[in-house]
């Protein structure tokens, strides 16, 4: 999943980014409100971790602007001011949850998983196709009950494919969501990672899980 962290305190932003990347999220950061709003408007994120007190544009203004544009991206707000009035203001503007500083990373990760589940039509903590399972809490993959070792990018790619099973995903959609930048038609990086993923999750004597759609992209068939 792709997360945007908008936080002007460099150490805090680095701490959150490192922790979320260890949890297998794809993370981008912004250090001021204007940059954060621009990134949130121009890109597709699964969730935002948003500080309230930011240079140039505060967190409340970002939430208000996103919701007025019809963006329903889940938002977890961070604040050093944990008063009831602050929480009420953020929630009334459309934030999904609030976390006061200082905080333990484990709580931030749990609250993030919670708002992601609430925003999804699929409330499960596991994604499954046949005997392939992806645990969204532990971030482990299993086939026939045996753990499959995945890199961060392989996990992010598999999660994106499974969350969108049944849909044809173009290479540009995959590139933007998993690699965080626009698609380079000359690059074969997606095909390389799909090949690696297939070698880990598929079996020669069983039907393919990841199907190639010629000239378009890839699809995981829905059972």
Image (tube, grey):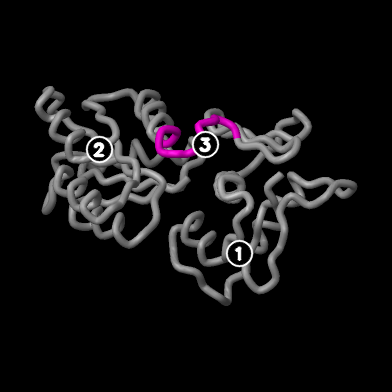
Task: Tell me the residue that label 3 is attached to.
Answer: 122
Q: Quadrant of residue 159?
A: top right
How far, Cα to Cα, is label 3 from label 2? Answer: 21 Å
Mark in front: 3 vs 2: 3
The residue at the point 50 percent across, 32 percent down is 123
Q: Earlier in the sequence, mark 3 or mark 2?
A: 2
Give SS at disc 1. Answer: helix
Q: Residues within 10 Å of mark 1 (few under 14, many from 20)?
A: few
What is the spatial separation of the Cα atoms under label 3 and label 1, in whole angstroms?
Answer: 30 Å
Q: Look at mark 2 in the image and give the residue it sits on.
A: 95
Q: Is residue 25 left or right of residue 187?
A: left
Q: Is residue 120 magenta?
A: yes
Q: Is residue 116 above or below residue 110?
A: below
Q: Is residue 74 left or right of residue 2?
A: left
User: Please, which residue is most extreme toward the bottom here?
Assistant: 186
Q: Is residue 136 left or right of residue 149?
A: left
Q: Nearer the viewer, residue 128 or 113?
A: 128
Q: Which residues are magenta?
A: 116-126
The spot of residue 170 in percent (x, y) is 57, 65
The quadrant in which residue 35 appears is bottom left
Do tag 1 and tag 2 residues touch (Cβ < 8 Å)? no
């Amino acid at each position: 999943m792709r997360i945007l962290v908008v936080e002007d305190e460099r150490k805090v932003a680095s701490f959150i980014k490192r922790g979320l990347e260890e949890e297998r999220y794809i993370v981008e950061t912004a250090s001021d409100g204007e940059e954060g709003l621009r990134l949130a408007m121009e890109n597709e994120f699964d969730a935002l971790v948003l500080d309230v007190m930011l240079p140039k544009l505060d967190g409340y203004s970002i939430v208000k602007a996103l919701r007025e544009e019809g963006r329903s991206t889940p938002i977890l707000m961070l604040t050093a001011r944990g008063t009831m009035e602050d929480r009420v203001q953020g929630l009334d503007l459309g934030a999904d949850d609030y976390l006061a500083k200082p905080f333990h990373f484990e709580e931030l990760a749990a609250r993030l998983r919670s708002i992601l589940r609430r925003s999804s039509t699929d409330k499960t903590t596991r994604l499954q196709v046949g005997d392939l399972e992806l645990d969204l809490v532990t971030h482990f993959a299993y086939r026939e009950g045996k753990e499959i070792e995945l890199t961060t990018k392989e996990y992010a790619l598999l999660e994106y494919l499974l969350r969108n099973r049944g849909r044809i995903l173009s290479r540009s959609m995959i590139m933007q969501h998993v690699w965080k930048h626009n698609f380079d038609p000359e690059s074969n990086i997606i095909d390389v990672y799909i090949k690696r993923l297939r070698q880990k999750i598929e079996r020669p004597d069983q039907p393919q899980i990841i199907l190639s759609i010629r000239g378009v992209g890839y699809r995981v068939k829905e059972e």
